[in-house]
Image: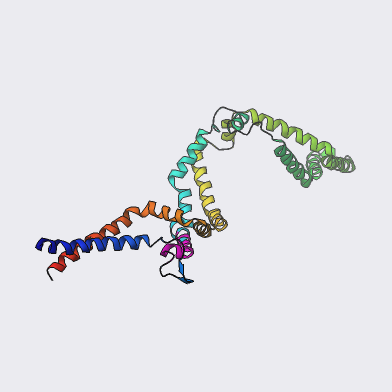
Amino acid sequence: MEYLHYIAGPLIGAVIGYFTNYIAVKMLFHPHEEKRVFGKRLPFTPGVIPKNKPRLAHAIGEAVANVLLTKQDIAGLITDSATQKAGTALVAGSGLFGEGSLEDFARRMGAGELNTEHLERFLTDKVWDSLKTMDIGALVEQKAQEIIQSKPMLALLPVDSILRSITAKVNEYVESEDCREKIAGAIHEKVEELKKAPTGETLASLGLTETAAEGYVADILQKVANTCVEPLLGYLNISKMIEDKINDMDIQMFEDLVMSVMKTELNAIVNLGFFIGLIIGVVNIFI
């Protein structure tokens, strides 16, 4: 019986400590809804987390948006050396700098038949508009005048009226639809030539080589980070997105989510209650 006196105190303390902490942990989530007796809400119902779910959702959303997923973090991820290497490898591995044609590249990328109609129309209009604003007739007249002045014998001839007539005809032709069609035909031939030429040669003629790809990728990623991240975050509104997601989540699902992350730590709290109760029981024997 004397041994029971020494064992009972620590054992009771351990059991009380264990179940006290166990109940406290359970009361974080349970009950999921408030309970009423005679129209009065029972204390501690619903559980702490269900009761404060909107506030927790807002706090978690703010924490993720302002601490865990900031503009600087995303920009750093975009410009990270690993991202740059991946982008460079993607460009290099795409075959863009290989021997295949632009049409071959389009088919590999799943684009099917390469349609350049809109590009050709755009280039044709741009070239035609540029010719019309250049006043080609005046340029022809100016060049002719320079030639005439360099030849004294030609200067004696009445060529001014002839030049004005030529200038008018030149400008009239530049404005005509026939001129536009000629430009369109020339551009179409060049585009068809480029479509069938090896893309590596075409890009190299523009100074775009596989060696320079890494620098181009890095520049593009840096510009994306500088100009796109902030508007993107403003559009996404990560804080509100996470808050709404948690608020829409069923409380049981939310509990399962938290427990999947914190189960070990919460069990440690319960076990700690057991050991603290045991120690208090042991100390109580000697008081």
What residue range appears in magenta? 45-63
Q: Residue at point 75% right, 45% down?
A: 130
* Whole-percent x, y for residue 212 in the image: 50, 39
The kind of secondary structure the magenta stretch mainly shows is helix
* Whole-percent x, y for residue 137 in the image: 82, 43
Q: Residue at point 40% right, 55% down?
A: 258
Left or right of 165 in this view: 189: left
Hey, which quadrant is residue 235 in on the image?
bottom right
* Whole-percent x, y for residue 42 in the image: 43, 69
Of the pair 138 and 49, the residue shown nearer to us: 49
Hey, which quadrant is residue 169 in on the image?
top right
Residue 122, relative to residue 278: is it above or below?
Answer: above
Q: Residue at point 86% right, 42% down?
A: 172
Of the pair 206 and 253, the residue shown nearer to us: 253
Q: Residue at point 90% right, 43% down?
A: 161
* Whole-percent x, y for residue 41 in the image: 46, 70
Residue 124, relative to residue 8: is it above or below?
Answer: above
Q: Is the image coloured rainbow, by chain, by secondary structure, or in one colour?
A: rainbow
User: If the image is split into quadrants, where does the C terminus sit?
Assistant: bottom left
